[in-house]
Image (cartoon, helix red, strand yellow):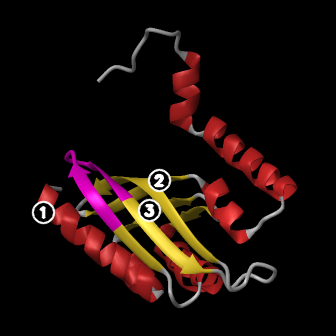
């Protein structure tokens, strides 16, 4: 994938997400793709990704959800972009509270589509804006830490000695 193709894909990706169009969002991914969401966890395959975006995420984020990517960088089969997203929560107990989030996204491509998506977002900032209780924030942060420590690349990184680098 080149820079122009990545920029076009990001536009399709974020517009479909904003619209809550699960099918159009999932069409940005390969059939066997994995979407690693920092709140809802991993989703595998187009059907699961479409369901997550349309029926889970939009249920909680509501109709004013926005997501825009900035400063995209494409390195062949990998892309990165910084983003801002915002919404007004529809979750019981937090409904009506506005949230603004910044994040970084990593995309792995195959055949012009997203094969794997990872995001890095300080979800504690979002939860603070929602007014989530500190004990619940701690519980969620512990789950995120667990996900991080279970990732193959994190396991490989932690197994190497300081000063060593991954080949390549």
Disc marking residue 135: none
- Residue 154 position (above or below residue 56): above
Residue at x 65%, y 81% (from the top left corner): 89
Question: Do callouts 3 and 1 mark residues in contact (Cβ within 8 Å)?
Answer: no
Which span of residues is magenta-colored?
A: 69-82
Q: CA distance from mark 3 to mark 2?
A: 11 Å
Residue 152 located left or right of residue 67: right
User: Can residue 27 be seen in this snapshot?
Assistant: no
Assign the N terminus to one quadrant of the image.
bottom left
Query: Comparing marks 3 and 2, which lies closer to the viewer?
Result: 2
As rendered, which of 140 and 161 lies closer to the eye? Answer: 140
Q: Residues within 10 Å of mark 1 (few under 14, many from 20)?
A: few
- Residue 168 position (above or below residue 143): above
Residue at x 84%, y 61% (from the top left corner): 133
* Residue 162 in the image, given as x and y percentages of width and height: 51, 10
Dot 2: what SS?
strand
Residue 44 located left or right of residue 70: right
Assign the C terminus to one quadrant of the image.
top left
Q: Which residue is mark 2?
A: 118
Q: Which residue is mark 3?
A: 33
Q: Which residue is mark 1?
A: 4
């Amino acid at each position: 994938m080149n820079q122009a193709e990545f920029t076009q894909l990001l536009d399709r990706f974020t517009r479909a997400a904003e619209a809550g169009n699960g099918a159009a969002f999932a069409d940005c991914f390969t059939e066997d793709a994995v979407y690693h969401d920092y709140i809802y966890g991993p989703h595998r395959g187009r059907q699961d990704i479409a369901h997550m975006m349309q029926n889970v995420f939009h249920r909680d984020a509501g109709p004013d959800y926005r997501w825009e990517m900035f400063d995209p960088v494409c390195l062949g089969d990998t892309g990165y972009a910084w983003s801002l997203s915002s919404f007004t929560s529809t979750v019981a107990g937090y409904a009506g509270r506005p949230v603004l989030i910044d994040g970084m996204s990593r995309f792995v491509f195959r055949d012009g589509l997203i094969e794997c998506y990872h995001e890095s977002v300080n979800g504690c900032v979002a939860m603070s804006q929602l007014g989530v209780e500190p004990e619940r924030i701690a519980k969620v942060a512990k789950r995120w830490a667990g996900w991080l420590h279970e990732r193959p690349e994190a396991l490989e990184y932690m197994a190497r000695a300081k000063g060593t680098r991954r080949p390549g």
